[in-house]
Every structure is written in C-alpha cells, then in structure tokens.
Image: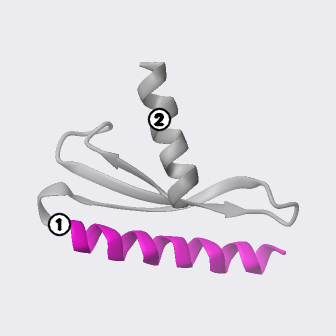
Amino acid sequence: DVETWLKELRAARRNGYAVDEGHFRKGITAIAAPVFNADGIADRAISITTVSAQLDAATRKRLAKQVQAAAAEVSKALR
C-alpha cells in the first residue's frame, strides 16, 4: 500500500540506504544505496542481495555501511 511505501522511502532517505526484505522474493534481502551524478541527482544505485537467514542485525548494519561507502566512492568519481 502507498502509506507503507512512503514510510519505507522516508526511512531510506533518513538512513542513506534502503532494505528490501522478502518483497521481491521470500527469504531474500537486498540492501541498496544511491549513486549521485555530477549534478547531485541520484540516478542509479549499488545493491547487494543475500539470503535473509544468513543476515543478522550486525551483519546487515555492516553490509549497509559497505554498500553506502561503495556508492559514495562511485558518486565521487562521477563529479
């Protein structure tokens, strides 16, 4: 529903990354961070996908930081 989607979008903006837990396929989690072009517009993203059962809270946080760092590095290269 729209309200749930908007809530998730606000969380992604606040956190700097988005998490999809089982929406596309049950048991699969994806973590994505935006890549910004030279104009500062997020027009692409970097993501990883893993089996949800292998993803505890600490690993999820660590991977999210790594995805954000990779996206920031690509964004920097595009400036």
Residue 38, located in which quarter of the rendered image?
bottom right
x, y percent for residue 3: 46, 23
The residue at 47%/35% (across/down) is: 7
The residue at 25%/39% (across/down) is: 25
**Model colouring:** one colour
Residue 3 or residue 39, whichever sits in front:
3
Disc 2 crowd, CA 10 A, few/some/many (<14, 14-19, 20+): few
Task: Using the image, determine if residue 27 lies above or below residue 45.
Answer: above
The residue at 58%/51% (across/down) is: 13
> What amino acid is at disc 2?
Lys
What is the magenta range? Answer: 55-79
Residue 33 or residue 25, whichever sits in front:
33
| Helix, strand or loop for disc 1 | loop
Task: Using the image, determine if residue 25 lies above or below residue 42.
Answer: above
The residue at 59%/71% (across/down) is: 71
| Helix, strand or loop for disc 2 | helix
Task: Using the image, determine if residue 22 lies above or below residue 46.
Answer: above
Please give the residue where the numbered disc 2 appears in the rendered image: 7
Residue 64, located in which quarter of the rendered image?
bottom left
Q: Is residue 19 magenta?
A: no
> What amino acid is at disc 1?
Asp
Q: Is residue 75 magenta?
A: yes
Q: CA distance from mark 1 to mark 2?
A: 23 Å
* Prevailing SS of the magenta stretch: helix
Image quarter where the C terminus lies is: bottom right
Residue 69 or residue 57, whichever sits in front:
57
Please give the residue where the numbered disc 1 appears in the rendered image: 56
Q: In the shown orientation, is residue 58 left or right of residue 36?
A: left
x, y percent for residue 23: 31, 36
